[in-house]
Image (spheres, rainbow, N blue to C red):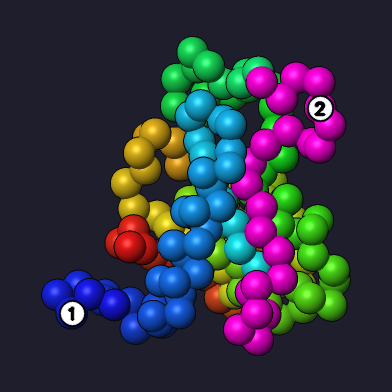
Amino acid sequence: MNETAIQLDPRITDKDEYYMSLAFAVAKGSKCLRAAYGSVVVKDGRIVATGYNGKPPHSINDHICYREGLPDNASKPNCCLHSEANAIIHSAPEERLGATLYVSGVPCTDCALLIMASGIRRVVYYDGPAASGHMGNSDFEFWRKYGFNEKIELVPMSKKAS
């Protein structure tokens, strides 16, 4: 970790910064023009799955981005699987149980519900400025409404991992 960095949240460790940097690297696989997200599932210090937002495998329209031309956070046809969903479906239930999910942005409400059902117990997400201006739409109140604010540790990370 950079010695001059200010660490505001004591829950964020050097390993958290490392795995978050991997989530940003995974996001580079996304073909989305507006919101390239990446996710990494880690259990007991082992990466068990990664995912980025994109079309289902073997899609015939993989080259098309339905978000093109839309303003940030505009409603749109659901054009891709989100990074959190891809990481979750590419891991086995026993690999997710008690695991940590690293997300390069704020999860949307649909992904928050999926995370709640997955067995993941900790979510570290980047909530700093997004290059695209796009941010997910879940918040602490949404998690509380479903009773998961105490079952899943939510750890915002405002500083982009280097």
Closest to the observer: 28 or 83? 28
Q: Which corner quadrant holds the C terminus?
A: bottom left
Q: Which mark is residue 14?
A: none
Q: Which corner quadrant holds the N terminus?
A: bottom left
Decide: few, some or many residues near mark 2? Use Cα within 10 Å; few <14, some 14-19, many ≥20. Answer: few
Residue type at mark 1 is Glu
Judged from the image, the secondary structure of the residue bearing numbered disc 1 is: loop
Give the residue at x 65% y 68%: 41
Cβ atoms under marks 1 and 2 closer than 8 Å? no
Residue type at mark 2 is Ser
Q: Where, by quadrant of the figure, is residue 112 drawn?
A: bottom right
Residue 79 in sight: yes
N-terminal of the pair, mark 1 or mark 2, is 1
Vertical placement of residue 27 versus 39, above or below = above
Q: Which mark is residue 3?
A: 1
Residue 155 in sight: no
Decide: few, some or many residues near mark 1? Use Cα within 10 Å; few <14, some 14-19, many ≥20. Answer: few
Residue 105 horizontal/vertical position (percent): 48, 51
Judged from the image, the secondary structure of the residue bearing numbered disc 2 is: loop
Closest to the observer: 35 or 138? 35
Vertical placement of residue 108 versus 41, above or below = above
- Residue extending furthest toward the left: 4
- Residue extending furthest toward the bottom: 44
Magenta includes 83? Answer: no
- Residue extending furthest toward the top: 69
Vertical placement of residue 69 versus 16, above or below = above
Find the magenta span and give its range: 42-63
Give the residue at x 73% y 50%: 86
Residue 83 horizontal/vertical position (percent): 64, 48
Identify the residue under disc 2: 59
